[in-house]
Image: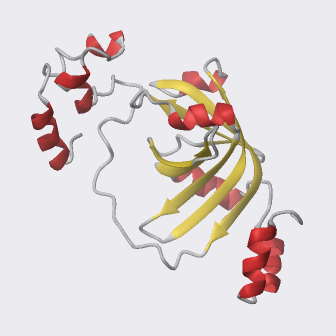
Amino acid sequence: MSDFYGDAQRQLQDRFGSRALADRLTELIIHDEVQDDERGFIESRDMFFLASVGADGQPSCSYKGGAPGFVRVVDARTLAFPSYDGNGMFLSTGNIRTSAKIGLLFIDFETPHRLRVHGEASIADDDPLKAHYPGAELVVRLAISSIFVNCPRYIHRHQKIAPSKYVPQAACEAPLAQWKRIDLVQDVLPAQDVARVPAAGGVIDFGNYLGKVAAGDG
């Protein structure tokens, strides 16, 4: 981990007198294999934040949610998670195919705790784990380069009210996203989504959709 910090980090550490502290933290908390307590934490999460980088160097941060355990610790150096149906932009997965380096941030908002994972990702639509992820379009595997905890002092405490009804389940098909019923996108929806619109309640105008978003059902 001697190359964990770049010149810019070192300059700021020297400016604020934290170089020695940064080096000590590298020794104490940064490692490249998942520990037993970290495995339990990761596989208990139902969401994480994913950072990726596009071809133009622009970083992107995305929220990823699923049922608890949707991120799997395949082995001590590998994580896997599904890519579910989204908005068709494929920003994160496209970025991964452009620049494989990504960062994951796992947070517990009820008992403040957070864990960061860095590494290089790969994507496959024929990954054997896909069969274990109902509704997955692709499976992402992350080869871990570093994993470490962060101080939780600035995490605001929140409580989970209910899981999203849109999270894919093995027993039934997830509901169609409300935005896919908007009149303004019907001519560009993938065929499989167009076929589901009538059963979901039919086409809605954009104004009605905004009302649903305001009510928390977008």
Residue 22 spot, x, y in % from top left: 77, 78
Q: Quadrant of the N terminus?
A: bottom right
Can residue 4 be seen here? The reply is yes
Most foreground residue, 37 or 200: 200
Which quarter shows the C terminus? top left
Residue 147 picture quarter = bottom right
Which residue lies at the image location 12% right of the left edge and 26% below the top edge?
204
Q: Is residue 151 left or right of residue 26?
A: left
Picture coordinates of residue 54, whole percent (x, y): 61, 40
Q: Residue at x 81, y 63 (%)?
A: 4
Q: Position of residue 207 (x, y in %)?
A: 11, 36
Q: Is residue 180 left or right of residue 128?
A: left
Viewer can see residue 18 = no
Closest to the observer, 97 or 48: 97
Residue at figure coordinates x 28%, y 30% from the top left: 177
| x and y percentages locating residue 29 in the rendered image | 75, 70
In the rendered view, tell whether residue 32 sits above or below residue 178.
Answer: below
